Image: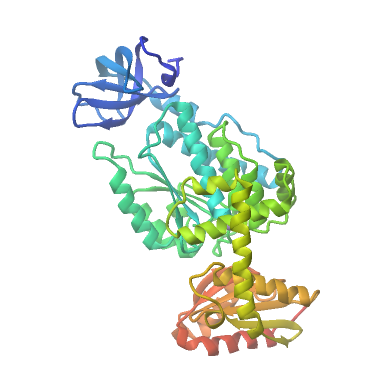
């Protein structure tokens, strides 16, 4: 038991207790077996043993089509206590964060718990599906988890084929459409002889009541789900329990620890990833994620200093991720995003294209921005549907952010609230905590139930959806809220 199965060589003779983590038929039965210290293929003409069985095997090791295999000569049921070995082996070997951070220390137990669970799933042969937000921070979250799992699989000699998936979500939450697509996908790759349902990890999404439907469907069907997110869970009790916790095996979110969204999901997934595999490192990941999500905390600066690069150049990588993920839509962009971290020229090409796109969108929309002062607040609106090009990057949300920055920089020191109107949606940006988005939603919903007001966001940014016919009335009501507001 003290030898990693992935270190076996042609000509060795193996005997020992192993756990079957995969079984392939027809033809001769090919098992993937693990002893907790690595995995290897083991072949036999026929066998009734199945995935999850613990067996004692003996056989010669040889090479077949470039792969190391044990040719099973003897196989019998074993009473070996495999769970204990797995539990020990699942505990991360690297527990130190890549930077010093009190925030991370607070969240450490949950991070270790998640890393252990992921390692245990990999050792057991349970497939892992990663779902992430499709912006820079979300893509980096997904990549950190994917590459660290891949690294741990390689250490163990486990072939990631059919065991590791990553895909983006278009909606800013784990929408039921995505959930159903994941169910279909999971059926497709869970082979008949491997009944193990995948472990689903939702990153940079998943914490809010909007995620409840999707996550409850998965829980009902017996899927294990983990959420790693930094968005405000909206519903959260004194003890840090959120509306989605009951559907999850683990939920990492800074708000659950009395913290805020400034520790981005990309940072969290990067540090969890380093616990999943001690060989996984890429200092660029958390630096770019932190800059992209405007996390103004010392951690971001420390991450940046570790890259040896300028903030400005790292920011370009983030912008390029946003552009590529916008173009790829539902595609995971396997291999493409990775290039942005290796090839500065690629980044420069994409970045200058993004610059041209912003120029065009601003040139056509800025002249139509309406600004007025209400109760000392600079209140601006712009109809983005009318004055921007549709289906063109940058998308309305990014255009509005830029417009809002321009307004705020012209009115330094003033509270500014900017609303972009896209038919049945208001996109909201503020430079101070003027009117929390959730408060607007609750108020409008009470007053105009027929408008079916919905959406999400936090103190300074968010989106509100509604029945488009009520657009003007709702906008007027937001103005009234500002008028009646006591400004401290
Ligand atoms: Mn994020």
Residue 242 picture location, percent across and down: 52, 58
Instruction: Please state, as top left, top right, bottom left or bottom right, where the N terminus lies in the image.
Output: top left
* Whether residue 111 is situated above or below residue 31 in the rendered picture: below
Pick the residue in front: 252 or 64: 64
Q: How is the image coloured?
A: rainbow
Residue 370 picture location, percent across and down: 66, 86
Question: Residue at position x 31%, y 44% from top?
Answer: 189
Q: Quadrant of residue 432?
A: bottom right
Residue 387 picture location, percent across and down: 56, 81
Q: How many marks?
A: 0
* Whether residue 259 is situated above or below residue 52 in the rendered picture: below
Question: Residue at position x 43%, y 26% from top?
Answer: 157
Q: Quadrant of residue 398?
A: bottom right
Ligand 1 rendered quadrant? bottom right
**Res. 263 in view:** no
* Whether residue 487 is situated above or below residue 195 in the rendered picture: below
Image check: 163 left or right of 104?
Answer: left
Image check: 270 left or right of 470?
Answer: right
Image check: 254 left or right of 194?
Answer: right
Residue 369 picture location, percent across and down: 65, 83
Pick the residue in front: 416 or 134: 134
Instruction: Please state, as top left, top right, bottom left or bottom right, where the C terminus lies in the image.
Output: bottom right
């Amino acid at each position: 038991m003290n030898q990693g199965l992935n270190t076996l060589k042609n000509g060795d003779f193996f005997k020992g207790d192993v756990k079957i983590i995969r079984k392939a038929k027809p033809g001769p039965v090919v098992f993937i077996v693990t002893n907790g210290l690595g995995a290897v293929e083991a072949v036999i003409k026929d066998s009734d043993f199945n995935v999850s069985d613990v067996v004692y095997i003996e056989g010669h090791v040889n090479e077949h089509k470039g792969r190391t295999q044990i040719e099973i000569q003897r196989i019998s049921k074993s009473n070996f206590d495999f769970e204990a070995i797995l539990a020990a082996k699942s505990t991360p070997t690297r527990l130190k964060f890549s930077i010093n951070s009190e925030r991370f220390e607070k969240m450490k137990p949950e991070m270790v718990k998640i890393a252990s669970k992921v390692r245990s799933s990999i050792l057991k042969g349970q497939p892992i599906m990663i779902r992430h937000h499709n912006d820079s921070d979300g893509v980096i979250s997904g990549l950190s988890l994917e590459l660290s799992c891949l690294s741990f699989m390689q250490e163990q000699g486990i072939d990631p084929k059919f065991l590791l998936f990553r895909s983006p979500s278009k909606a800013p939450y784990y929408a039921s459409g995505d959930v159903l697509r994941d169910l279909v996908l999971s059926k497709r790759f869970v082979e008949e002889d491997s009944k193990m349902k995948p472990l689903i990890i939702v990153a940079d999404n998943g914490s809010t009541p909007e995620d409840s439907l999707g996550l409850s469907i998965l829980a009902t069907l017996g899927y294990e789900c983990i959420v790693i997110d930094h968005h405000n869970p909206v519903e959260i009790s004194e003890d840090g329990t959120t509306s989605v916790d009951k559907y999850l095996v683990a939920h990492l979110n800074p708000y659950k620890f009395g913290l805020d969204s400034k520790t981005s999901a990309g940072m969290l997934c990067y540090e969890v990833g380093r616990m999943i595999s001690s060989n996984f490192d890429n200092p660029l990941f958390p630096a770019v994620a932190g800059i992209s999500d405007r996390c103004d905390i010392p951690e971001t600066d420390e991450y940046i200093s570790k890259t040896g690069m300028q903030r400005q150049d790292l920011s370009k990588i983030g912008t390029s991720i946003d552009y590529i993920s916008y173009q790829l839509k539902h595609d995971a962009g396997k291999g493409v995003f990775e290039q942005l971290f290796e090839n500065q020229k690629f980044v420069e090409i994409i970045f200058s294209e993004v610059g041209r796109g912003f120029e065009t969108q601003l040139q056509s929309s800025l002249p139509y921005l309406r600004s007025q002062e209400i109760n000392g607040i600079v209140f601006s609106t712009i109809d983005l549907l009318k004055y921007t090009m549709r289906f063109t990057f940058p998308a309305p949300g990014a255009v509005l952010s830029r417009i809002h920055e321009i307004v705020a920089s012209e009115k330094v020191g003033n509270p500014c609230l900017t609303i972009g109107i896209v038919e049945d949606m208001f996109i909201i940006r503020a430079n101070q905590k003027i009117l929390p988005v959730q408060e607007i939603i609750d108020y409008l919903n009470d007053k105009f139930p027929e408008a079916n007001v919905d959406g999400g966001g936090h103190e300074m940014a968010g989106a509100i959806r509604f029945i488009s016919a009520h657009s003007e009335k709702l906008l007027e009501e937001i103005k009234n809220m500002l008028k009646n507001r006591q400004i401290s």
